[in-house]
Amino acid sequence: MKGSFITLEGIEGAGKSTCMAEVLTVLKAAGRDVLETREPGGTRLGEELRQLLLGHKHTGMHEDTELLLMFASRAEHLQQRILPALNQGQWVLCDRFTDASYAYQGGGRGMDVERIRQLENWVQGDMRPDLTLLMDLPVELGLARAGKRSSPDRFESEALEFFERVRNAYLEIAGNEPQRVAVIDASRTLEEVQAQVREVTRAFLEGRA
């Protein structure tokens, strides 16, 4: 039986790491074999591309280059890890996927969404996540949380208005695909956020039984 593909999305400081840990706990308790991974990254090549994309060595990177590098990393990730795992019956839990390209490059950078869609169709075919948990919270709160954990990467150094556009793009995706995207109120207490995540994950498991 083919596995299921779950992704986690959200702006900086939304608590995706906490969310991933909670989803993983629920899936393992249900006896699922889970592959944890992330984007950009997930493979040796992908992790090298991640350093280029998130580091400050190429701060003047053109937006086209950024988008193409994201999808180059994604293509490698899909072929080397995600698709083989799913085909072997594993469940895949991924920190960010193509929704992030629509949100960051489409919303944040203002790139033509149709260009992103063409790359998505080329790299992925009809492959899409089965469930996406969108960790949503006000931008100011997210950036304040992110600022406490580490120095900002290339994306985290963007202006507040950039992240407002990213958040709005994410919420637009959720509004257009409510069957796939579950919005988690990440502004609430840790216990409340974890409870939301558990509820969504367990409901998804029941639907896959």
Image (spheres, helix red, strand yellow):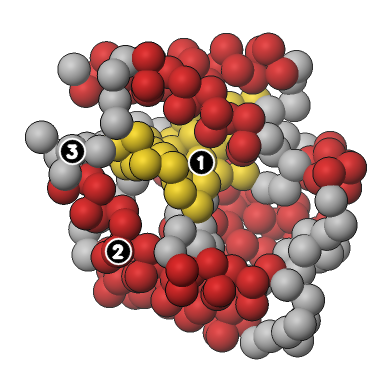
| Viewer can see residue 39 | yes
C-alpha distance separating marks 3 and 1: 20 Å
Residue 166 horizontal side relative to residue 116, left or right: right
C-alpha distance separating marks 2 and 3: 15 Å
Quarter that holds the N terminus: top left
- Judging by the rendered image, the residue that carries numbered circle 1 is 8
**Residue placed most toward the observer, 71 or 183:** 71
Residue 162 horizontal side relative to residue 96, left or right: right
Q: Secondary structure at mark 1?
A: strand
Disc 1 versus disc 2: nearer the observer: 2
| Residue sticking out furthest to the front | 44
Report crowding for label 1: few under 14, some 14 to 19, many 20 or more residues within 10 A (C-alpha).
many
- Judging by the rendered image, the residue that carries numbered circle 3 is 89
Residue 57 in the image: x percent, y percent? 76, 82
- Judging by the rendered image, the residue that carries numbered circle 2 is 80
Residue 134 horizontal side relative to residue 29, left or right: right
Report crowding for label 3: few under 14, some 14 to 19, many 20 or more residues within 10 A (C-alpha).
some
| Residue sticking out furthest to the left | 1
- Looking at numbered disc 1 in the image, what kind of residue is underneath it? Leu
- Looking at numbered disc 2 in the image, what kind of residue is underneath it? Gln
Q: Is residue 15 above or below residue 76?
A: above
